[in-house]
Image (cartoon, grey):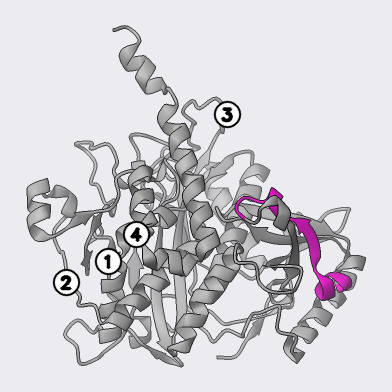
């Protein structure tokens, strides 16, 4: 498909289609490849800085946990940054390096250049680029989450596959964000798909979508979710690396737009005990050139052998990668919520798949066109590191293809309505029920260790063990309320 130019930025971007069509063909993105295309993109960036009066260029990357990091450079320094990168102390970044290995380089990727016109003003507009983190000798840092995903995508490419993802991102809009741990106040009392008359929520979604579109991030849907104050904005299909970059940008833009309207946006998986949590259901597909590798017109389910083995891989290794897709203590309160008599629980806490079953971990959505064949993984939450999450899911699916895993029978019942004995009899194993269990399972996974690399794998486990130890020793308001008067 032909590229198109962003209305505001001028960067050539891929055409993206929604659920009904095949994703566009994306250009190769690698700032360490000094080809003609990259040189031209650098020239375009430098020219745009001058023409648009851009005073601030932010260079972005993430730590192992997915926290966005940024350094601003003056436009006059950017040409040198393209050649040499920006040095920084890697030992000060979560999971990057030990003190005696601290020197690292952030190398800006000019193909990710985006102008943020909504941040303009008397001081001129600002822009950002994502960076690849390198060692002083120019080799990729094994601790860089973007590099982890690049490795996984390269492995898929060696097999002839291109990996596409499409996230449905849920989050809460809150009147306040109390720092003392007290319960926050949602901005409205709306429910699923409600056309809320609350001005903040309605205006927020419109402003957020416009801001995303102005920087070239295409939005497919936006609507109110089930819980009061809960919103959902779905991004269009893109290759997995572009999508991960877009998710990081999305979080920043959403938080900025929320603050500009006098409220706060939270991607915490479950802020409220008695309300649903925020997931990031993600649709996945593999293409072989222009052909959707998941589609088979002759199969009764229209699923190819590749698709069935990919799903089987996702299921087989689901417990092993859950610590990555659901990385916080709070994540497991979304997966295993308090049972309420007036609520239908759709949390994907059990390892199974189905066609129309929203209680299943992996769902195969109904689709019309062959190129729309895909699978939906429903366990991810909105606070995951998207680079690592996409890498481990792709790794699990490819393992299923390589080993020829057989797809078990699908689940069409509401898995949550079954008893524990019934689930056991049907072979529906539960995901880890808390972070401690997830860490234990992940620590024994050869697959996750291989996908993440030794450095990221070891740091992630150490960090999460420390988080769990701190959490389990903390005396909570629940305990004081229940036990203080004994």
Residue 408 is tagged as: 2
15 shown above or below 246: below
| The N terminus sits in image quarter | bottom right
Quarter of the C terminus within the rendering = top left
Judged by depth in the image, the label closer to the viewer, 4 or 2, is 4
Return the x and y of residue 130 as percentages of the image width and height: 69, 66
Q: Earlier in the sequence, mark 1 or mark 4?
A: 1
- The answer to whether marks 1 and 2 mark residues whose Cβ atoms lie closer than 8 Å is yes
Residue highlighted by disc 1: 315
Q: Earlier in the sequence, mark 4 or mark 2?
A: 4
The disc placed on residue 179 is: 3
Q: Are marks 1 and 4 in contact (CB under 8 Å)?
A: no
Residues at marks 1 and 4, CA–CA distance in whole angstroms: 10 Å
The disc, 4 or 3, on the residue closer to the chain's N-terminal end is 3
The local crowd at label 3, few if under 14, some if 14 to 19, many if 20 or more residues have their Cα within 10 Å, is few
Q: Earlier in the sequence, mark 1 or mark 3?
A: 3
Q: Pointer 4: what residue?
A: 320
Report whether 403 appears left or right of 120: left
In this view, the mark in front (1 or 4) = 4
> Which quadrant of the structure image shows residue 104?
bottom right
Q: Quadrant of residue 447?
A: bottom left
Q: Name the element at disc 1.
A: helix
Q: Position of residue 48 (x, y in %)?
A: 83, 74
Q: Earlier in the sequence, mark 2 or mark 3?
A: 3
- Residue 290: percent from left, percent from top: 45, 92
* Of callouts 1 and 2, the N-terminal one: 1
Task: Residue 72: give x, y in percent of width and height.
Answer: 81, 57
Q: Which residues are magenta?
A: 79-95
């Amino acid at each position: 498909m032909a590229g198109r130019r962003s209305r505001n930025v001028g960067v050539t971007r891929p055409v993206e289609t929604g659920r009904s069509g095949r994703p566009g063909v994306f250009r190769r993105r690698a700032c360490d490849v000094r080809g003609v295309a990259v040189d031209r993109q650098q020239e375009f960036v430098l020219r745009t800085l001058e023409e648009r009066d851009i005073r601030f260029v932010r260079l972005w990357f993430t730590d192992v946990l997915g926290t966005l990091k940024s350094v601003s450079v003056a436009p006059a320094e950017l040409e040198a940054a393209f050649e040499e990168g920006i040095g920084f102390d890697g030992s000060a970044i979560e999971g990057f390096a030990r003190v005696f290995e601290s020197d690292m380089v952030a190398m800006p990727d000019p193909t990710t250049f985006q102008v943020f016109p909504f941040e303009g003003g008397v001081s001129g507009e600002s822009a950002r680029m994502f960076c690849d983190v390198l060692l002083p000798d120019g080799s990729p840092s094994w601790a860089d989450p973007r590099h982890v995903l690049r490795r996984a995508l390269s492995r898929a490419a060696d097999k002839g596959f291109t990996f596409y993802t499409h996230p449905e991102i849920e989050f809460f809009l809150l009147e306040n964000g109390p720092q003392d741990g007290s319960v926050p106040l949602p901005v409205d009392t709306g429910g699923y798909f409600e056309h809320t008359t609350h001005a903040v929520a309605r205006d927020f979604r419109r402003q957020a979508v416009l801001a995303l579109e102005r920087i070239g991030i295409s939005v497919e849907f936006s609507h109110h979710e089930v819980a009061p104050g809960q919103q959902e904005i779905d991004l269009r299909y893109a290759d997995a690396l572009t999508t991960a970059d877009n998710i990081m940008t999305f979080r920043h833009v959403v938080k900025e737009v929320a603050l500009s309207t006098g409220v706060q946006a939270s991607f915490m998986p479950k802020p409220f005990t008695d309300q649903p949590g925020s997931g990031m259901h993600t649709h996945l597909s593999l293409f072989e050139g222009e052909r959707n590798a998941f589609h088979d017109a002759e199969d009764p389910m229209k699923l190819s052998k590749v698709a069935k083995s990919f799903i089987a891989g996702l299921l087989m290794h689901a417990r092993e990668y859950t610590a990555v897709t659901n990385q916080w203590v709070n994540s497991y309160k979304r997966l295993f919520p308090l049972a309420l008599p007036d609520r239908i629980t759709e949390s994907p806490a059990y390892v199974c798949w189905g066609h129309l079953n929203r209680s299943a971990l992996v769902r195969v959505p109904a689709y019309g066109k062959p190129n729309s064949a895909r699978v939906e993984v429903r366990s991810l939450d909105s606070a995951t590191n998207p680079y690592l999450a996409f890498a481990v899911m792709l790794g699990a699916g490819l393992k299923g293809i390589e080993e020829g895993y057989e797809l078990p029978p699908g689940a069409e019942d509401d898995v949550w309505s079954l008893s524990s004995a019934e689930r056991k009899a049907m072979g529906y194993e539960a995901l880890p029920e808390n972070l401690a269990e997830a860490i234990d399972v992940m620590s024994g996974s050869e697959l996750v260790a291989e996908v993440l690399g030794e450095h990221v794998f070891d740091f992630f486990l150490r960090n999460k063990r420390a988080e769990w130890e701190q959490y389990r020793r903390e005396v909570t308001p629940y305990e004081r309320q229940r036990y203080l008067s004994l």
